[in-house]
Each structure stands twice: as structure tokens, then as C-alpha cells.
Amino acid sequence: MIVYLDNSFLNRPFDDPEVGTNKLESEVLSLILELVKAGKADMVNSSVIEYENSLNPITERKTFVKEILKGSKVYQNVEDKTKKRAHFLTQEMMLSPIDALHLATAEQAKADIFITCDYGIIKKYKGEVKTINPLEFLKYYENSIK
């Protein structure tokens, strides 16, 4: 299983745990990192994730995400075909340019699952990568090990 974690999810541990499902979503991130460490999942890092992370003004968050990404076995740069696909996703699915780049990069990396806390992405994207929130991933994972 190849997973692409977007920055909203990678930064979830810094969000208020008392709000909504933040605490549980943070625990799902920990589970995924354990799966990666155990060799049961591969995580994608990309130039898009690194770029977006570099814009984070909070050093602690930026460093945290950099450390997580060290566990990635798959790295994907943005290529011309990625940019073309991202443009299509922006036009046809009304995704923001950065979200479209993330998804086009996930597609190019052959990710099985794209995990995000951005429900707008989940609603809009209708492509080849399964795009779900962290709690949906938990259900997916629990069903896959039965």
C-alpha cells in the first residue's frame, strides 16, 4: 500500500485535540507511521509536499513534517505531465492549484491512497487515487486486515 499524506494531515498533531476529530486523526497519523516503519505501507514524499511545508511559518511544525518525510521510500518530483494533469484537475474538478498538484503528484507516484483532512478535496476529486480522510483510512485499514 502506497500512501500520500497531504500537509493538512501531516500537521494534524498540532491542531487542538479538543476540537472535532483532531485527536483521533492524530492517532491515525501515528498508526500510518508505524505501518511505514514496519514495512506494511510506503509513504510518498514529493517536491509539492516539501514546497508547501517550506511555506509553514512555524518552525516546530516544519521540522516535524521534515522528520516524518524521512521515512518515505517513494519520492516524486513535479514533471511536465504532472503540471498538465494538475491544470486539468484545476479546470475540471475546481481544485486549487496546490491541491491539484498534490493529487497529480500522487497519481504519478502510483499512490493507492491520498489522505487529507480537507473535505473539499475529497468531495471534488474524482480520479484514480482513493482520496479519503484519516477516519476513513482507519476503517479501510481495519477491513483490510480482517
Image (cartoon, rainbow, N blue to C red):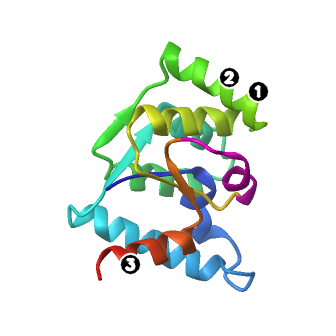
Q: Are marks 1 and 2 in contact (CB under 8 Å)?
A: yes
Q: Nearer the viewer, residue 92 or 134?
A: 92
- In the picture of the structure, the residue carrying the numbered disc 1 is 91
Q: Position of residue 28 (x, y in %)?
A: 48, 74
Stretch in magenta: 119-127
The single residue placed furthest to the left in the displayed view is 39
Q: Is residue 58 above or below residue 128?
A: below
Going from N to C along the chain, the mark reached first, 1 or 3, is 1
Q: Position of residue 12 (x, y in %)?
A: 61, 66
Which dot marks residue 53? none
Going from N to C along the chain, the mark reached first, 3 or 2, is 2
Mark 3, secondary structure of its residue: helix
Residue type at tag 2: His
Q: CA distance from mark 1 to mark 2?
A: 6 Å
- In the picture of the structure, the residue carrying the numbered disc 2 is 87
Overall secondary structure of the magenta stretch? Answer: helix
- Report if residue 60 is visible in the image: no
Image quarter where the N terminus lies is: bottom left
Q: Crowding at label 2, few (<14), some or many (≥20) Cα neighbours within 10 Å?
A: some
Mark 2, secondary structure of its residue: helix
Q: CA distance from mark 1 to mark 3?
A: 35 Å
Q: Position of residue 59 (x, y in %)?
A: 60, 52
Image quarter where the C terminus lies is: bottom left
Q: Position of residue 7 (x, y in %)?
A: 59, 51
Residue type at tag 1: Gln
Is 40 placed left or right of 114 in the picture? left
Which dot marks residue 143? 3
Please tell me which residue is depicted at 49% across the width and 69% down the height of the picture.
137
Q: Are marks 1 and 3 in contact (CB under 8 Å)?
A: no
Q: Is residue 48 magenta?
A: no
